[in-house]
Amino acid sequence: MNNSTSLARVVVRQIIEVGITDVVISPGSRNAPLSLAFNAAAERGLIKVHVRIDERTAAFFALGIIKATGRPVPIVCTSGTAVANYHPAVLEASHTNAPLLVLTADRPAILRKTGANQTTEQARIYGKAVRYFADIDGPVFPMELPFDSLRNGPVHLNIQFDEPTLPDESNQWLDEIIVSPKEFVPRTKAGTLKSDANRGVLVIGHDRGGLSTQSVEKFATQLGWPIITEDPLSFPGAIAHASIFLTSSEIRAALIPQTVIVIGRTTLSRSINAFIKLAPTQIVVDPRMATVDSDRAADKKFIEIPQLNTKKASEEWLAQWKKYAARCAKQIEGLTGFTEAVIAKEIAAGIPAGSTLFVSSSRPIRDLEGFAIPREGITTYANRGLAGIDGNISTALGIASASKATFAVLGDLSFLHDLTGLIHHEEINCCFIVINNDGGGIFSTLPQRGLPGFETVFGTPHGLDPAVIAAAMGIKSSTITTIAELKKTLAAPVQGISIVVAKVPSRDANADLLKAIYESMSSI
């Protein structure tokens, strides 16, 4: 057996034996030893192989599987530019501590800097974004350290394969595989959070710092403070519409807390961040402070959910929050028309219980934060590590591949940015709702609106029809322009992949509506 085949089989065997169930492969010649070994294992039912021709798509698809299953996922590519195309997803994985196992094939090290074809410096290409790196050659490699490092984020193994790269005909090595997953047992003891505040607030970032919804819900229940959350579809006891009514400086002044506890990071609304800064004491709970956010400022910091030694919130304090939430809700109930705000409100209310929801960056996730009424019964996801609009289709499909029925809400630019994510040959059930305002709508809500050249460098109108593009790719698509049609979409069974384009008013009209809503908060 040649060294390349031996090394690939040793790596693949160890990956399967620790309980990893999925791998995402992009076609290439130099990664043939790994691709063929994974394929042979898949034919035995030992692992599921997903193939994506675009490496950026492949990596984000793997991130989606990780989100939905909680298990590490390897990605496999050839040498050269293929390796660089993984970089956006590696960065997203790094900033969410996601266990992405990056397996990049390479030529032998002796060929580097010699002008050899498809050969570049792949070693340490991802820099500090990975928790472990190894540049590997030879017939064997032990995977204990890489597997251990995956607990804290992505790992990169650059694997040198020399010719010949094709295996012999024997697959006897598969008979020796014994799957024996190892459960990680934390070695540290949770600290204790002490506070005498009875006017405290718990603020929950959208991805909760990677902590489970169940553990955060338990913590919130024990704490007994008002809850502000960027993801109201995961915490039914949260205060509704907080990001909207806290745009009022008068309301923020009336609700100054003694202490704020932040779980994860708050990355969506300036109003929430302005509110947090008013608290004399700020406490942060986020595992990422042990990896990528080590310099984060707070009065007290915990990298896991702490034990509580606190007081419940006073009834008067809770009543104040409920009062403003109820008054804001009346304003929102009066909104009509096929606007982005109303669409977000209806999506939040209408998605069937038991569904999975992926929300893209930019306006969609902020509209759901502000206009949704808190509820339960939905599992939500988003790419909030670096909050990019790249890879959103692929991440949603990765989630959907491990879920029964998935809805994904994307802006038109997020949709166009990741079109290659729609190229696949798998049975996946995902309904994409594309909010089409012909460009970058979020910029119309920011200070640069109206500046010379705004439409050219920020608004970026594309004039394209996402429904026509999807149809050209053989995907079922439609366009809706009414709330009644949206409700029908949400009520229909999710079968296969479909694209539903919500054609909404102009970006300027949406920005003006949001401004009017925010200004009305001063009088509630």
Image (spheres, helix red, strand yellow):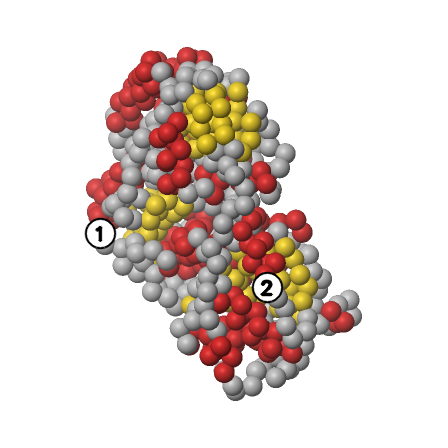
Residue furthest toward the right?
114
Q: Which residue is mark 2?
A: 143
Residue occupying the point 69% across, 60% down: 123
Q: Which residue is mark 1?
A: 492
Report helix, strand or loop for mark 1.
loop
Please, what is the three-letter code of the amino acid marked with disc 2? Met
Front one among 200 and 123: 200
Residue occupying the point 51% across, 86% down: 170
Can residue 344 be spotted in the picture? Answer: no
Q: Is residue 164 above or below residue 55?
A: below
How many marks the image carries: the answer is 2
Q: Is residue 441 above or below residue 56?
A: above
Residue 393's disc number: none
Residue occupying the point 51% across, 46% down: 186
Residue 221: image x %, image y %? 35, 30
Residue 363: image x %, image y %? 43, 37
Front one among 138 and 187: 187
Residue 54: image x %, image y %? 51, 63
Earlier-in-chain disc, 1 versus 2: 2
Q: Is residue 185 above or below residue 202?
A: below
Residue 483: image x %, image y %? 24, 40
Distance between mark 1 and mark 2 Cα atoms = 46 Å
Q: Which part of the image, by quadrant, shows the N terminus?
A: bottom right
